[in-house]
Amino acid sequence: MDVKSSIVASLDGSSTDILPYLPYLLKDIVEIGTDPNQVSQIIKKHIKNPNSLKVLDLGCGKGAVSVRLAKELGCEVVGIDALPDFIETAKQFALEMSVDHLCSFELGDMRELYSSYKNFDLVVLGAIGPVFGDIGKTLEKAAQCIKTDGHIILDDAYIPDGSNLKNSNYINQSDFYKRINKAGFTIVAEEVINPDNMWEGNKIIYKSIEKRANELIKLYPSKSQLFKDYLEEQRIENKALENDLTCGVWLLKKTG
């Protein structure tokens, strides 16, 4: 999967034709994917001296998690994302929150950049999708960026065992946990997301995207189907997340 396809897939799209319009479609959304508060809380509960952490946020988006950790915990954070608009927004956000001295944001393909980052205490994988492949391969790549006893924050989802759901983007529950262990990690903490809470957040985000999509349809009527298809992809993904998948945030510790 090339970088354009990876970006679109991580934002629940399928056609790379939507890529130039994603910054506008997501214009009103700062927290894309992962809940910064949930990440902050799980770190404070389970990691000693969180203010001394050196954090790598792979697929940092607009910097919501990175800036929250820097502001609340005093962490030094490096964020990587492949969308120029997101990186510029992240830099501005850090400046506005007076943590620009703690945050560094780099534009690029994380698959090419990750290997140059070593000895981090924590890597954040915030709903980045199959950029590196399946969860096992993703964790194996991320493991190269952290210290021997380092941690990973994983925001992901799995198909509950016994479900008849067929979705190529997710694996079943048993396989999900097996791949975490095989990649050399143990689970320190697990917080499953309440579907009702997810529904509220998804509804707000969908309405925002719908508003911007309708504006784009008026501006580019010949591309109306492109925007309608993206809206439908959001609806389908939200339905799966709210009804068919188990979504959560996991704190993992490297063991091997």
Image: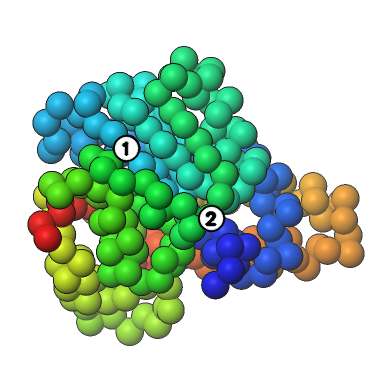
Is any atom of residue 114 visible in this view? yes
- SS category of the residue bearing label 1: strand
- Residue shown at 28% from the left, 56% from the top: 144
Q: Find disc 1 in the rendering and name its residue.
A: 55
Q: Find disc 2 in the rendering and name its residue.
A: 109
- Residue shown at 48% from the left, 21% from the top: 100
Q: Left or right? Give the position of 153 relative to 21.
A: left
Could you say which is closer to the camera, residue 184 or residue 178?
Answer: 184
Q: Position of residue 227 (x, y in %)?
A: 73, 61
Q: Are discs 2 and 1 less than 8 Å apart at CB?
A: no
Could you say which is closer to the camera, residue 121 or residue 124?
Answer: 121
- Near mark 2 (Cα within 10 A), the count class, few <14, some 14-19 or many ≥20, is many
In the orientation shown, which residue stands out farthest toward the front? 116
Q: Position of residue 165 (x, y in %)?
A: 37, 80
Going by the numbered disc 2, the residue's amino acid type is Asp
Note whether 230 is above or below 92 in the view shown. below
- Residue shown at 40% from the left, 49% from the top: 116
Going by the numbered disc 1, the residue's amino acid type is Val
Q: Which one is earlier in the sequence, the residue at label 2 or at label 1?
A: 1
Q: Left or right? Give the position of 87 relative to 31.
A: right
Question: Residues under labels 2 and 1: Cα distance?
Answer: 18 Å
Q: Position of residue 62 (x, y in %)?
A: 53, 38
Q: Position of residue 142 (x, y in %)?
A: 31, 56
Note whether 138 is above or below 154 in the view shown. below
Quadrant for residue 89, please give it.
top right
